Image (cartoon, helix red, strand yellow):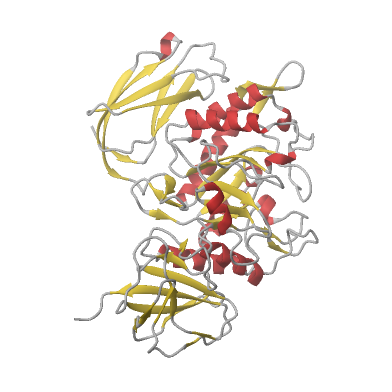
Amino acid sequence: MASHPMYSPVELAFTGPSDPLPADRVPLRVRFVTEDATEIVVPGFWDGGDRYLVRFAPEREGRWQWVSESESAPLAGQEGAFDVAGASGHGPVRPAHTFHFAHADGTPFRPVGATAYNWLHQDEPLFSETPAALAEAGFNKFRFMVFPQAGGHVEHFPTLLPFEKDADGGWDVSRPVVAFFRRLDDAVRLLGAHGIEADVLLLNSYDGGRFGLDGLTEEQDAAYLRYVAARLSAFPNVWWSLCNEFDILTDRPAERWDRLGSLLAAEDPHDHPRSIHNWMELHDHNQPWVTHASIQNGDATLAFGRASLYRDAYRKPIVLDEIKYEGDIADRWGHLTGPELVHQFWIATVSGCYASHGESFTLPNGSLHMVQGGPLQGESPARLGFLRAILDDLVIPGLDPIDKWDDPAYVAGHPRRQYLQYVPDAATWTFRLPQGNKGERLEVGDVFEVDVIDTWNMTVSSVGGRFALTDVHRNEAFAADAAPVELVGAGPFALRITRVEPAM
């Protein structure tokens, strides 16, 4: 028997009753067990006709045995085994080190995201062009909606919709349109092939009565969530966002969202990241089902010291999934310049947070990239790909404010190991580091190397020489013997400061 790699989905196919089970309940579950009795129970789903599937992505090597369970006799009691060896990729992303993310194998993941809400519903070649353009720019997370969007700048409406209609013309969630959800499968696979995490926006508030999918009952929402979780959870690159701008749907109390979020957590055996995104009113991201805070706030990244406050409020990773867009439309959220958006990303970065990009230049058909996707036009994508490369080169798990109580330079990093300082307006820089209130303390004689990062021209240059600490105080430390560093060029600049072992 050939072995199967970790993190890659195993797909088991079953033949069910000739009269298919309604898809608004879980038709079967499969119990996967390792040799040391580790057990994971995975839900299955209807895939059309008499075909039922179960998808499972193992995260441990060795022999796995499985047995199916169902109220339907043809689906119950089937069993088998397979061996797992090696790995395909790094595995699913989950929160790590309180405020950051890492893959299942421990590899850090630093999201630099992008957005095109209605991408799933576009025709070719736009559908395939979008992940290719995102990957070329360097984005590694992509937000898109499952249900189609209506409203401003939406110029394409799909004919393929998620559910069949009932006798009264409403949506019958017990009869999903399999072709629709197979396309969703393909979308997640395509993003994964380009190295991009699929941030799946499960519900949306932009229906406006065109499709009526924002009018499902809580029970219908729950049936849909069970189905889509069973279909997608084995894909290693999945993230869940319960809704985009949830608070536009004013008839839904917070308790309803929390019940759905808790259901999603329970029905996903692969424990993918889970969030909910706001318009004006923040959800309570302290809820246990929420793994990271997905926040829209156009003001949070305009100045130092703002975004990091969310970290203190939620003690979870903070992803600013809308900080306005680079574009040329009149709306206040859609006409940032490239330099403005790049600047805000760097503010988010040294705040110990993450951010998502969007592009809102008016396209010939009247739409926007952040609606439909396609090739990118702006100046920011290349610079954000460069930022991602800087983050991927870090030798620390993530960036945290070193002295969040009162550091006028807002230096981030890991005490006594590596630091990043953003200096958007400086012409020179004098070596200074804040002392952390936690972690190791700086000491006289500590030696550092410094790289100057031109955040717009995308260059990294070593200052040359080394900096040894001579003056160490309670709250800050200096290399008093070192001359100021000239920041040559247009900038803005950042400094990467890495401790090295002194030469013997």
Q: Position of residue 411 (x, y in %)?
A: 49, 69
Can the viewer see residue 183 in this picture?
yes
315 with respect to 6 (left or right): right
279 with respect to 350 (left or right): right
Q: Position of residue 235 (x, y in %)?
A: 45, 39
Could you tell me which residue is drawn at 47 percent across and 32 percent down? Answer: 268
Q: Position of residue 236 (x, y in %)?
A: 43, 42
Can the viewer see residue 355 in this picture?
no
Residue 405 lies, with reference to residue 151, above or below; the image says below
| Front residue of 219 and 250 | 250
Residue 442 in which image quadrant:
bottom left
Residue 43 lies, with reference to residue 482, above or below; the image says above
Residue 490 in which image quadrant:
bottom right
Q: Position of residue 153 (x, y in %)?
A: 77, 51
Residue 343 in which image quadrant:
bottom right
Q: Which of the image's four quarters has the N terminus?
A: top left
295 with respect to 467 (left or right): right
| Front residue of 136 and 322 | 322
Could you tell me which residue is drawn at 64 percent across and 72 percent down? Answer: 339
Q: Outermost residue, front direction?
A: 474
| Front residue of 23 and 52 | 23
